Image: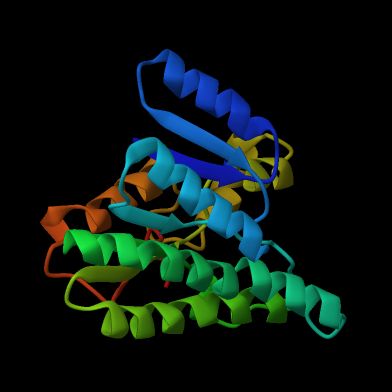
Amino acid sequence: SVTFSGISEAGETTEKEFTGKGYKVQFLRGDIAGEGFCVEMVEAAVKRWGRIDYLVNNAFSFIAKGIDATRKDWERMFNVGPVGYATMAQLCAPYMRKQGKGAIVNMASISAFIAQPNRWTYNAAKGAVVQLTRCMAMDFSPAIRVNTCNPGWIWTREVDKAANFDREKWEPVWGKFHLLRRLGRVEEVASAVVFLLSDKAGFITGTDLAVDGGYL
């Protein structure tokens, strides 16, 4: 049973697709940068499923700017990222604690650990997520485990667009940054997230799992 959100109507298509396959899913369209929507999300999940066991904070703005970044860019970057993540965790934690168990995965990035040209906003926000996760893990222990997942270059919708939907051409070019000489697949990141949420990762908290093909 999963409640998920997004800022575009594409989530409605995904909801219908998974519902049609027999999965229990619920989609809410909105922006995690707004506290009101975060509250709406959690309330909808509890109303529909009766409990909250896991939280995956994955929403983020891709504002990659450096010297040219405006204050508005910075505020948008952090409101969606670390602030939105913190708000969702604050709202979900009481339900997990009531059950005596829970797990949170915050999506960070290789960009949290390296310098990249003209990427002050994105890299700083992702770096903040890593540190936020460590603090969450300390304050939510022992009932709730909190970890980050740090992907390398992944064939997401945005990366596909950047490649003009020509993976065959760009895979060997961008793949050179990774020891495995290719980009990651979305399902490879998803399986790592599922692992971190599961009891198989029961003794893992406050740590960073790189799913980066050896990039770092």
Q: Residue at x 51, y 63 (%)?
A: 177
Q: Residue at x 39, y 15 (%)?
A: 21
Q: Residue at x 53, y 82 (%)?
A: 128
Q: Is the residue 43 above or below the residue 141 in the image?
A: above
Report whether 196 appears left or right of 45: left
Q: Is the residue 59 above or below the residue 72 in the image?
A: above
Q: Does residue 186 show up?
A: no
Q: Where's residue 87, x and y in %? A: 52, 70
Q: Where's residue 132, x and y in %? A: 44, 81
Q: Where's residue 203, x and y in %? A: 12, 69
Judged from this view, the residue extending furthest toward the top is: 20
Q: Does residue 12 show up?
A: yes
Q: Quadrant of residue 207?
A: bottom left
Report whether 106 appears left or right of 69: left
Q: Where's residue 13, x and y in %? A: 60, 24
Taking depth in this image into account, of 139 and 195 the one nearest to the observer is 139
Q: Is the residue 58 above or below the residue 119 in the image?
A: above
Q: Check the image and tell me how it is coloured.
A: rainbow
Q: How many marks?
A: 0
Q: Residue at x 32, y 51 (%)?
A: 52
Q: Quadrant of the N terminus?
A: top left
Q: Quadrant of the C terminus?
A: bottom left
Taking depth in this image into account, of 59 and 171 the one nearest to the observer is 59
Taking depth in this image into account, of 64 and 77 the one nearest to the observer is 77
